[in-house]
């Protein structure tokens, strides 16, 4: 069981480390660079080649049943769900086989709307303390499900 973190612009890396360490699960922090490696022996830092979606490709090739993936990237989430991994967004929202289709469709619709109306750019809310709390709770529940 491994926790994979799509680390570029991930606001919950410290929380993943705290919860993963408490449960003694290996964690892999994957990014294109700019991430300081942790001295934690349970954490492996992987720096992938520069380029679009390289971190996503790396995670998607490895994640599977029994793993947890932390990402806000919906196409990556869909691949990981299909491979049997549990997926959480940094807000704590679980992405599952039951909801990933709707989430992908909504993402595509919003991309089309933003392309048609540039004034729709940047309207998302910021990351809040409530989001962080929901994430911690969701990660804790996901790890307990895996370890029984």
Image: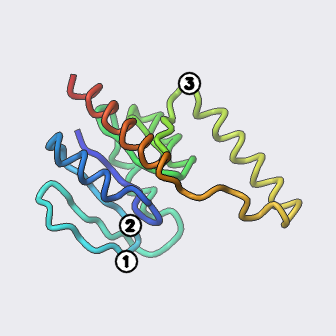
Tag 2's secondary structure? Answer: strand
The furthest residue to the right: 116
Q: Residue at x 11, y 59 (%)?
A: 41
Q: Secondary structure at mark 1?
A: loop
Residue positioned 49% across, 42% down in the render: 79
Q: Return the x and y of residue 71 as percentages of the image width and height.
A: 46, 50
Residue 20 rendering spot, x and y as whole percentages = 23, 46
Vertical arrangement, residue 138 with respect to residue 27, above or below:
above
Labels 3 and 2: the sequence-earlier one: 2
Residue, disc 3: 98
Judging by the rendered image, the residue that carries numbered circle 1 is 34
Residue toward you, 147 or 49: 147
Q: Is residue 72 above or below residue 44?
A: above
Proximity of marks 1 and 2: CB atoms separated by less than 8 Å: yes
Disc on res. 31 = 2
Residue drawn at x 26%, y 28% as measured from the top left: 144
Instruction: Indicate which disc, 1 or 3, sits on the residue closer to the N terminus.
Output: 1
Name the image quarter holding residue 88.
top left
| Residue 145 locus on image (x, y percent) | 29, 25
| Mark 3 residue element | loop
Residues packed near mark 3 inside 10 Å, few (<14), some (14 to 19) or many (20 plus): few
Cα distance between the residues tagged 1 and 3: 35 Å
CA gap between label 1 and label 2 equals: 8 Å
Query: What count of labels does the image hold?
Result: 3
Q: Is residue 146 left or right of residue 98?
A: left
Quarter-of-image position of residue 134? top left
- Residue 29, given in percent of the width and then of the height, sits at 31, 60
Q: What is the spatial separation of the Cα atoms under label 3 and label 2, in whole angstroms?
A: 28 Å
Tell us which disc is closer to us: 1 or 2: 1
Q: How is the image coloured?
A: rainbow
């Amino acid at each position: 069981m491994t926790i994979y973190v799509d680390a570029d612009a991930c606001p919950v890396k410290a929380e993943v480390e705290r919860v993963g360490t408490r449960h003694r699960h290996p964690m892999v922090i994957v990014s294109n660079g700019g991430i300081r490696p942790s001295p934690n022996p349970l954490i492996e830092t992987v720096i992938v080649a520069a380029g679009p979606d390289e971190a996503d490709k790396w995670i998607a090739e490895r994640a599977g049943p029994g793993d947890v993936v932390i990402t806000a990237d919906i196409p990556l989430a869909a691949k990981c769900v299909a491979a049997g991994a549990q997926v959480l967004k940094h807000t704590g929202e679980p992405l599952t086989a039951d909801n990933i289709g709707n989430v992908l469709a909504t993402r595509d619709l919003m991309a089309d709307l933003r392309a048609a109306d540039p004034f729709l750019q940047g309207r998302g809310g910021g990351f809040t303390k409530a989001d962080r709390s929901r994430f911690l709770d969701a990660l804790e529940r996901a790890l307990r499900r895996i370890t029984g």
